[in-house]
Image: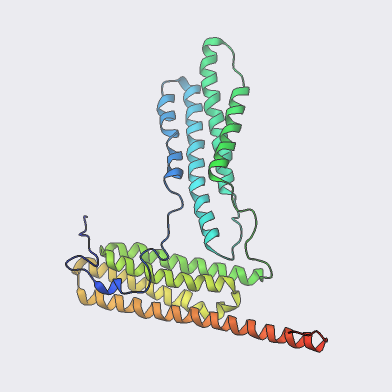
């Protein structure tokens, strides 16, 4: 359904949104699997149609090649998203399965099968088929795909000195929290109100600041767990109920109450993040003071 555009300078615009401190694009999340990844689905389409009238073997080879290229495109999309998630975090483990590298390999195999199909069809006339060209085309396809999209992260990031058991606990809790945020995004779309969608996105940015802080220091998990589980679960449930009700009634009182809830949640999440940062600073100060005392006892002068 078409929606009327609204903003600060619209007749019914909300100037309060413009007064918020965050910028328009602060915390915006760009889809990592964009047009250049989606275009990789295209080669399989003409290959399917070209193979329909090429006999049983020619059609089978064409469909296999198209399936390999499509699978490679799907793996590439997931690999780009996993890489974006890896880059967005200061502390992260490398992807368990190298999707982008697997996509490059599948692309090369698909190109090689497609080239073998063409050689096979030509061999029905010339009476000779060779594997040299398919192998060369496949190797070139693999190399070009890897050059175009790169390879997966091959090592962990920021994991030096981190308790892996604690980090695994944090990862599970953060993944659960991200699922709650994704559910909020999907639910609020049913309200068909761009301003409230933007308000939810701003709250999610504040929540993810807390996620990153906990990931950087897993010791903060115990204090932040209720924010990442209980509070976000409640925010998700409230968003679902609001979207269902508001989409039917367009009740402005319900809208105001929901926005007020987001304001309260955002303030509390920001305050918790700030408190954890201050605690971390206090811990650092203690460590520095202890080290200075030890050095002075050893006779080392600190000017």
In the image, 242 versus 95, the foreground residue is 95
Q: Looking at the image, how many numbered discs can be counted on the residues?
A: 0
Instruction: Specify whether 62 is left or right of 112.
Output: left
Instruction: Please provide percent x and percent y for residue 263.
Output: 35, 78
Could you tell me which residue is drawn at 28 percent across and 62 percent down? Answer: 190
Instruction: Please provide percent x and percent y for residue 238.
Output: 33, 74
Instruction: Specify whether 254 is left or right of 135.
Output: left
Up/down of 88 relative to 146, above or below: below
Farthest residue, direction right: 299
In the image, 226 versus 192, the foreground residue is 192
In the image, 97 versus 289, the foreground residue is 289
Instruction: Locate the N terminus and report the quarter of the image it occupies.
Output: bottom left
Instruction: Specify whether 248 is left or right of 91.
Output: left
Could you tell me which residue is drawn at 16 percent across and 67 percent down? Answer: 11
Instruction: Locate the C terminus and report the quarter of the image it occupies.
Output: bottom right
Could you tell me which residue is drawn at 46 percent across and 20 percent down? Answer: 55
Instruction: Please provide percent x and percent y for residue 59.
Output: 46, 25
In the image, 213 versus 63, the foreground residue is 213
Up/down of 214 relative to 65, above or below: below
Could you tell me which residue is drawn at 45 percent across and 65 percent down? Answer: 179
Farthest residue, direction front: 303
Up/down of 302 relative to 39, above or below: below
Farthest residue, direction top: 126
Instruction: Please provide percent x and percent y for residue 97.
Output: 59, 51
């Amino acid at each position: 359904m078409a929606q009327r555009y609204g903003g600060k300078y619209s007749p019914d615009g909300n100037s309060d949104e413009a007064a918020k401190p965050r910028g328009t694009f602060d915390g915006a999340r760009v889809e990592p699997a964009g047009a250049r990844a989606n275009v990789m689905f295209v080669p399989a389409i003409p290959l399917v149609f070209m193979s329909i009238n090429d006999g049983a073997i020619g059609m089978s080879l064409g469909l296999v090649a198209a399936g390999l290229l499509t699978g490679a495109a799907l793996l590439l999309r997931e690999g780009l998203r996993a890489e974006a998630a890896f880059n967005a975090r200061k502390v992260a483990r490398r992807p368990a399965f190298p999707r982008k590298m697997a996509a490059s390999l599948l692309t090369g195999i698909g190109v090689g099968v497609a080239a073998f199909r063409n050689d096979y069809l030509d061999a029905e006339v010339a009476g000779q088929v060779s594997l040299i060209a398919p192998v060369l085309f496949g190797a070139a396809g693999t190399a070009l795909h890897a050059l175009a999209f790169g390879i997966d992260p091959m090592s962990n990031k920021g994991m030096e000195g981190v308790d892996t058991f604690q980090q695994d606990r944090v990862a599970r809790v953060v993944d659960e929290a991200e699922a709650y945020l994704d559910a909020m995004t999907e639910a609020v779309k049913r309200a068909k109100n761009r301003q409230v969608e933007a308000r939810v996105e701003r709250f999610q940015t504040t929540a993810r600041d807390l996620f990153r802080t906990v990931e950087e220091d897993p010791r903060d998990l115990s204090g932040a767990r209720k924010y990442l589980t209980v509070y976000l679960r409640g925010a998700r449930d409230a968003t679902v109920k609001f979207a269902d009700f508001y989409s039917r009634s367009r009740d402005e009182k319900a809208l105001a109450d929901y926005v007020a809830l987001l304001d309260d949640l955002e303030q509390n999440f920001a305050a918790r993040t700030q408190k954890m940062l201050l605690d971390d600073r206090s811990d650092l100060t203690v460590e520095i003071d202890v080290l200075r005392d030890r050095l002075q006892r050893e006779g080392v002068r600190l000017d």
